[in-house]
Image: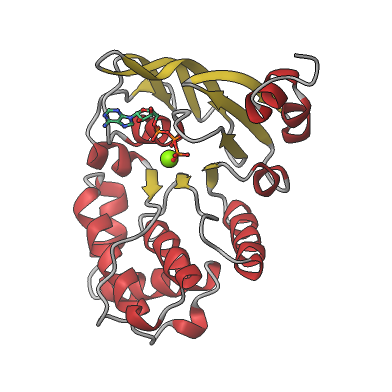
């Protein structure tokens, strides 16, 4: 098991945003987490990425509890979160953005075996450029490499956010609503990118409230309601679960 989440709880004052949630992620799988607005999805991802400390519970990454560790420490272990809307510099090109992300990766990486791949004499820049080209190709942005951020469509901006995260070579990539605000063609493109990222060896944890989007390619789905896990399993089984139907419709057909 790559990641084990054990009895994770996050309280904000009297509100329990994430309530005693447990699940595991195997290497190479795509896990989809869905739930209505305010069900705790973003809070859960933030706990995994170290952007918030949990109130109680454990986040066990490769056998080590990383709950409460700082985000740069968690990122250096290989767990990276993308933001719903990446902050871009309008006058810089797509290629320059991914190169900037590599410097962020560089400052995060304290592990000497990984650092040496950057610092090999004379090879540093070539390694980074090759990595940038690979990230842009994976995210279907190779043709937009010289465009400035100001010229990008919303869908391209979001893909650039994913490409920037890929520069950190995540083992587990956490995506917060990657499909939100995208048109049908862009969603189709995103689905192909996500499949390619998995084929590349990246484990993915994706949150979204578009259940149909996740059901198409996730290996495992988890449904949240008011911070609690109400169902887990294969996406179609979870969608058919009476507790999930009830949560989405507000009440069951028989109520
Ligand atoms: N920093 C915070 N302080 C206080 N309450 C918070 C904080 N962050 C989230 N909450 C509350 O925790 C609950 C879960 O919020 P969260 O953003 O995790 O939900 P979500 O499932 O991501 O919702 P959405 O689908 O709207 O993005 C909500 O009631 C929210 O108001
Ligand atoms: Mg959210």
Q: Nearer the viewer, residue 161 or 35?
A: 35
| Residue, far bottom | 146
| Residue, far front | 255
The answer to whether 154 is drawn above or below residue 219 in the figure is: below
Q: Position of residue 124 (x, y in %)?
A: 27, 70
Location of ligand 2 given as a quarter of the image: top left
Q: Residue at x 68, y 24 (%)?
A: 244
Q: Position of residue 226 (x, y in %)?
A: 48, 21
Q: Quadrant of the C terminus?
A: top right
The answer to whether 218 is drawn above or below residue 12 in the figure is: below
Q: Position of residue 156 (x, y in %)?
A: 47, 72
Q: Residue at x 23, y 58 (%)?
A: 104
Give the left or right position of residue 129, taking residue 7 as reference: left
Count of numbered labels shown in the rendering: 0
Q: Position of residue 119 (x, y in %)?
A: 23, 63
**Type of colouring:** secondary structure
* Quarter residue 63 falls in: top left
Q: Nearer the viewer, residue 176 or 136?
A: 176
* Quarter residue 59 falls in: top left
Q: Quadrant of the N terminus?
A: top right
Q: Residue at x 41, y 35 (%)?
A: 45
Q: Nearer the viewer, residue 120 or 19?
A: 19
The answer to whether 156 is drawn above or below residue 118 in the figure is: below
Give the left or right position of residue 73, taking residue 9 as reference: left
């Amino acid at each position: 098991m790559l990641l084990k989440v054990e009895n994770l709880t996050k309280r904000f004052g009297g509100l329990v945003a994430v309530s005693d949630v447990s699940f595991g992620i195997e290497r190479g799988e795509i896990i989809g987490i869905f739930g209505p607005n305010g069900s705790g999805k973003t809070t859960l991802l933030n706990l995994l990425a170290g952007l918030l400390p949990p109130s109680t519970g454990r986040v066990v990454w490769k056998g080590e509890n990383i709950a409460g560790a700082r985000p740069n420490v968690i990122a250096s272990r290989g767990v990276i979160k993308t933001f719903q809307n990446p902050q871009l510099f309008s006058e810089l090109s797509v290629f320059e953005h991914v190169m900037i992300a590599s410097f962020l990766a560089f400052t995060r990486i304290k592990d000497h075996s990984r650092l040496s791949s950057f610092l090999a004499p004379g090879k540093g820049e070539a390694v980074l450029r090759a990595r940038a080209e690979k990230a842009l190709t994976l995210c279907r942005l190779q043709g937009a490499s010289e465009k400035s951020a100001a010229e990008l469509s919303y869908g391209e901006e979001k893909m650039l956010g994913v490409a920037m995260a890929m520069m950190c070579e995540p083992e587990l990539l956490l995506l917060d609503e990657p499909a939100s605000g995208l048109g049908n063609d862009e969603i189709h493109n995103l689905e192909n990118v996500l499949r390619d990222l998995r084929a590349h060896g990246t484990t993915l944890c994706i949150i979204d409230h578009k259940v149909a989007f996740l059901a198409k390619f996730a290996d495992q789905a988890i449904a949240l309601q008011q911070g609690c896990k109400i169902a887990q399993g294969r996406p179609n089984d979870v969608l058919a679960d009476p507790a999930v139907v009830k949560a989405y419709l507000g009440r069951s057909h028989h109520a």
